[in-house]
Amino acid sequence: MLQEEPFNRYSRYLKKKYGQPVYRVGIDAGFSCPNRGKDRGKPGCTYCGEDGSRAPYLGTEQNLKKQIDGTIAFLKDRYSSHIYILYFQAFSSTFAPVLYLKHIYDYSLSLAPFRELIVATRPDCLDRKKAELLAGYKNMGLDVWVELGLESGHNRTLTLINRGHGAEQFVKAFNLLKEFDIKVTVHVIFGLPGENWHDIQKTVKSIASLRPDGVKIHNLNIPEDTVMYNEFLMGEFTAPVDLRHMDYTIRALEMLPPETIIMRLTTDTKREKLASPGYFMQKAKFYSLIINEMKKRKSYQGKRFLS
Ligand code: SF4
């Protein structure tokens, strides 16, 4: 456990590993997603907006060199940065034939001296050849991570939110990546329709049993350009506000293995698109709140982890 913080925070993990702050260069390589199709021919997950899972800080620029050069120039100027991680973030970044993926990964990695490669994807966009390709980048001295969306461990919820895969498919993809010794970060969403703490607890328990390298926790956000927004308008459910999310998160952190790196605790959605929650405190304030509350509760990551 890192000193002074009750959970294993990603930024501190990186700082400890490299001796200085490390920055992710998030790019949109133009991949699509099998659950929504190239031109949104399918509905996709009910919480998926027009932007897919592209973070608000990413532009629409499709030119990889321009994106990478632009982000690095910005980071250098603002933070005097030196160390970078290449992060394929938007949509499903293994959703293409393996030769094309190789071309895109190779080219992008050649544009800057990256130290790590992170690829975000879905369980149904991985197979043995893709895992082998990703594992091959470790031979270049890179740490290789795959971010894999589970969101909920309950198939009834996955059906309700139209994830397009089941919990079993997630476990299969997870195990495949571990077979190739690839680091895996699991995404989970707290506050999905029909789920209370009892359901979330079961999901967290199943994630903890896999002992993932990283976890990203999201609070449910409902943007206006989603199917879920219409369900929300019908009053079928609410998105957790900060205090409810804080409580879920602390209890979840206690259940996770102490060594798992906590890479995120909240969701980023462009303010102007967000219908609910109406108010959620700023990220830095939320982190302070969690840390203070955990100290008050004598809580820490792994406290209730059953190995
Ligand atoms: S997997 Fe991601 S990009 Fe695909 S439909 Fe779901 S949220 Fe959208």
Image (cartoon, rainbow, N blue to C red):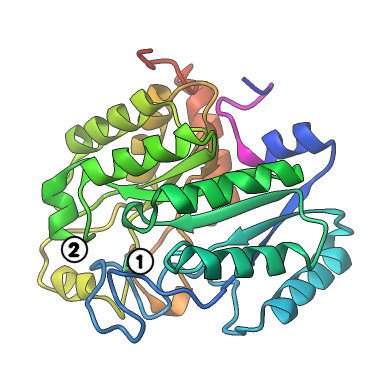
Q: Nearer the viewer, residue 101 or 204?
A: 101
4 in magenta: yes
Secondary element type, mark 1: loop
Q: Quadrant of residue 182?
A: top right
User: Would you say residue 260 sits in the magenta stretch?
Assistant: no
Q: In terms of image quadrants, where is residue 250?
A: top left
In the rendered view, would you say 262 is above or below 126? above
Q: What's the magenta bit mostly, secondary-structure-wise?
A: loop
Amino acid residing under circle 2: Asn
> Is 151 placed left or right of 104 in the picture?
left
Mark 2 close to ligand 1, CB under 8 Å: yes
* Segment tinted magenta in the rendering: 3-10
Residue 64 screen position, x and y as percent: 67, 77
Residue drawn 25% across the image and 84% down it: 41
In the picture of the structure, the residue carrying the numbered disc 1 is: 278
| Mark carried by residue 162 | 2
5 with respect to 195 (left or right): right
Residue at the outermost top position: 307
